[in-house]
Amino acid sequence: MRINNLVALVLFSLFLASCSKNSKEEIVLEAKNGNIEDALICKFLPYQNFSEEENIHLYSSKQGDSINVNRVVLNFKEIPANIKIDSAFLQLKFNAKSVIGKESYGENGFVIQRIISPWDETEVNWANAPVTTDDNQIFTDKTKLNKDPNRINVTRLVQDISDDKDNSYGFLLKLINENSSSLVLLASSNNSDVSLRPKLKIYYSDKQ
C-alpha cells in the first residue's frame, strides 16, 4: 500500500513538472511608454517623415502617368528573444476620423514582411526605407469599407523575430497590388483613442 502511494506521488510530481515546462504565457504589446514605433512612408514625398500621424493608411493611387504609394513600418520592440511562439496575432483598427477618407476601398489586401535592417521612427522615409525579407511573409484579405482587418495571424513572423532579434526590426505593411486605386485606413500608435492603437498578442512558452 505504501509502495502504491509512493508511486502515485512520484507520478503526480512528474505530471506537475511536465505542466510547468509546457505552460504557456501571454504577452500583449501595445503603445505604452514608447515601446511601439510606427510611421507612414510615401513614394511621392520620399524625404518626408510621417511618424506623428494619427493614421497609418496603406494607399495606392494613379496620378497621371505615375502611381503614388504609401507603406507602413511598425515595430513592437519588446518581443521576447529565444522563446517558442505558440501563436501571435496582430490587431489593427480602422480609423474613422482620418482626414484621408471615411472608408477603405479597392483591392486592398496587404502583405506583412519582416524588416531586417535598422530604422529610426523620426527619420524613416521612402528614400531610406529599411530592408525586408519575404521569408514567411503574411498575406491578408481585402478590408471592406469601414471594417477592421481580420485578426492577423503573424505567428511565423514573430517566431522569426524571436529567433533572430539582432536582425529583426518589426514589420513592413504594403498593399499586395500597388498598381490599383486602393486604401486601408488604419489607426497609428499616436491615435488619441487608445483602443484603436496597434496591438500584438503573443502566446509563448520557453524553448525546451
Image (tube, rainbow, N blue to C red):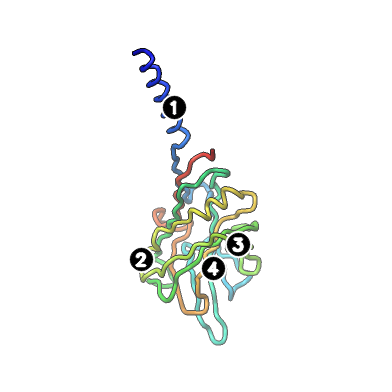
The residue type indicated by label 1 comes to Leu
Q: Is tag 3's residue or tag 4's residue first in the polypeptide sequence?
A: 4
Report the Cα–Cα distance between label 1 and label 2: 48 Å
Q: Are marks 3 and 1 in contact (CB under 8 Å)?
A: no
In the rendered structure, the answer to whether residue 172 lies left or right of residue 109 reads right
Q: Are marks 4 and 1 in contact (CB under 8 Å)?
A: no
The residue type indicated by label 2 comes to Lys
Q: Nearer the viewer, mark 4 or mark 1?
A: 1
* SS assignment at label 1: helix
Q: Residue furthest left?
A: 1
Q: Which mark is residue 131?
A: none
> In the rendered image, which residue does mark 2 sit on?
147
Q: Which mark is residue 71?
A: 4
> In the rendered image, which residue does mark 3 sit on?
133
> In the rendered image, which residue does mark 1 sit on?
14
Q: Residue at x 54, y 38 (%)?
A: 208
Q: Residue at x 49, y 69 (%)?
A: 58
Q: Is tag 1's residue or tag 2's residue first in the polypeptide sequence?
A: 1
Q: Residues within 10 Å of mark 1 (few under 14, many from 20)?
A: few
* SS assignment at label 2: loop
Q: Is tag 3's residue or tag 2's residue first in the polypeptide sequence?
A: 3
In the rendered structure, the answer to whether residue 91 lies left or right of residue 72 reads left
